[in-house]
Image (spheres, coloured by chain):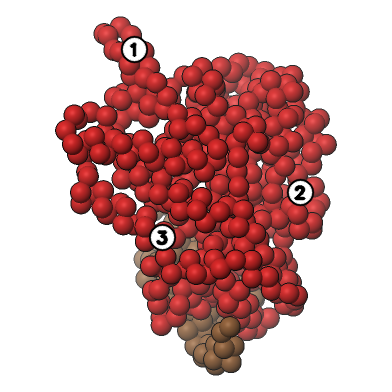
Chain colours: A red, B brown
Amino acid sequence: MTIKQTLSMEMMKQDFPILKRLINNKEIIYLDSAASSQKPQIVIDTIKNFYENTNANIHRGVYKLSEEATIAYEEAHKKVADLINANPNEIIFTSGTTASINLLAYSLGKELKQGDEIVLTELEHHSNLVPWQQLAKEKKLKLSFIKVKEDLTLDLEHAKQLINSNTKIVASTHVSNAIGTLIPVKELAKLAHEVKAYYIVDGAQSVPHMKVDVKDLDVDFLAFSGHKMLGPTGIGALYGKRELLEKISPFMYGGDMISEVTWEDSTWNELPMKFEAGTPNIAGGIGFGVAAEYLKAADPEKIHAHTKDLAEYARDRLNSIQGVTVYGPTNSENRSNIVSFNIEGIHAHDVASILDKEGVCVRGGHHCAMPLMTKLNLQGTVRASFYLYNSYDDIENLVLAVEKAKQVFNK
Amino acid sequence: MIDKNQITEVSLTEEQEMYKENVLDHFKNPRNFGTLLDCKKEKGLNPLCGDQIELFVKLNNNKIEDIKFNGKGCAISQASASLLTEHIKNKDLNEVKQVNEEKIKELLGIPISYMRIKCANLSLKTLKKITGE
Ligand SMILES: Cc1ncc(COP(=O)(O)O)c(C=O)c1O
């Protein structure tokens, strides 16, 4: 085993004030960025500064404060757009991935009729499953799931069988938050477009960690969350190709999203306002923009290389512990920054509780992917996810904590 | 690199405090584990851990004549089910209705963190469905 020090990401750790905190006199070993990432000082300062110096509603006032707030909020769209190679008017700010997908289920759902088909994968987070499932029930649509193979990668042959001329929507995650599988989104985009279906990607786990270029991947819609990519909670985005966003119906009606209103009817504002009804999360949006800028400067390709190296090293170390099973694709090419594992005879939540006592923050459970866990015959897994502020030392701590869990349970 | 020796020297007490021998024993060798026929039964689910409990209660003259549970999940949920069934078996229903979260914590005898209370309480919540509270 060789340790590849890909880059001095660890230097960046200093940008994250929370990681200086001690709990029970121990450093925080934060390995749960897939649930929510920590925030760099610059994002925290941006939000504080907004409320201290700029706060006002946007698009409404003509005074200086409102103008500054409006410019900052619009700039934020541009920064997020730059990160994924989109145009600023193709970026709709939402409260996060879940809201983005629900928006689509509503707006695209309006176009669907009985007998139309929606194709998902077995790797979806509940937030890219339940909205479609409920839409399908309501409208009598057919819902099917592309299988994962024995090696926990997506079965593209099965995808080809499922996607047909009745398919109107194909939606998949980019990276499985439960077991870390990377999905071949470019291939799925091709398959979906061959039958003129929309292709939607849940980028909650990919946009924070790797280069995601919506033009290169040719996805129609991409949903992601600010809080998993160094930004604040309560803000995220939906990217959509401009011609599609212009075509589909708005999801929420109200102020800001209209162009003209009479007693009888209304017309819609231009993009992205058409989809941003009401006073948005202004401070959050501005913080989100700064987070996107920070990520771009750190270079998503380097972040991917760094977090993947850490994950590979963690897999090796955990695999060498007796009684530990590591899940995920057998082929390293299909793996990401997420390592899912179990210790024989100990429930994932008990492992997580013991690791917590060692200062190691991991997630234990079904990771909002209950049908997948049932299919794999697992009650849950322990998940360690790595980000730019993590280091090889963190993995040593993880390994020691896992040994300790075994001792506590006399394994 | 961190000093491994320094870390392994840290005593286990805190974790052991959390998973005391008694709790681990009830987890590994659950009492009243199984099913009953011709009885009242209810299921409980804890979406946080994915814990599952099914309780089977046979009442006779307002007394818990027999009780069994089935399930899978984390040590805290399963041990507390085992401890609870042991505690209320052969007890009068009125007495059983007095059992509350505090009692469960007392039976477990370990500190339960805020996030784990749901695990500890799962069997109690399921029992309450049967006793009709
Ligand atoms: C793959 C995936 N999709 C969707 C979500 C939901 O994101 P949010 O809770 O920010 O809406 C998550 C986060 O848990 C995720 O990992």
Categorize mark 2 by other alpha carbons within 10 Å: few (<14), some (14-19), many (20+): many
Q: Secondary structure at mark 2?
A: loop
Measuring from the top left, give residue A179's x and y in whole percent: 67, 55
Along the viewing direction, whichever of B112 and A63 lies nearer the viewer: A63
Q: Residue B44: x, y in percent? A: 53, 54
The residue lying at 50 percent from left, 53 percent from top is A297
The vertical placement of A279 against A271, above or below, is below
CA distance for labels 3 and 2:
34 Å
The mark lying in front, picked from 3 and 1, is 3
Neighbor class of circle 3 (other Cα within 10 Å; few <14, some 14-19, many 20+) is many
Residue matched to label 1 = A266
Disc number for residue A153: 2
Quadrant where the image shows the C terminus of chain A:
bottom right
Query: Alpha-carbon neighbours of circle 1 within 10 Å: few (<14), some, or many (≥20)?
Result: few
Residue A40 disc label: 3
Amino acid on which disc 1 is placed: Ser
Who comes first in sequence, dot 3 or dot 2?
3
Query: Is any part of residue A65 visible from this angle?
Result: yes
Q: Are marks 3 and 1 in contact (CB under 8 Å)?
A: no
Disc 3 vs disc 2: which is toward the camera? 3
Helix, strand or loop status at disc 3: loop
Under mark 2, the amino acid is Thr
If you read the primary sequence from the N terminus, does the residue marked by circle 3 or circle 1 appear first?
A: 3
Q: Chain of mark 2?
A: A
Dot 2 or dot 1: first in sequence order is 2
Residue at image point 80% right, 47% down: A149
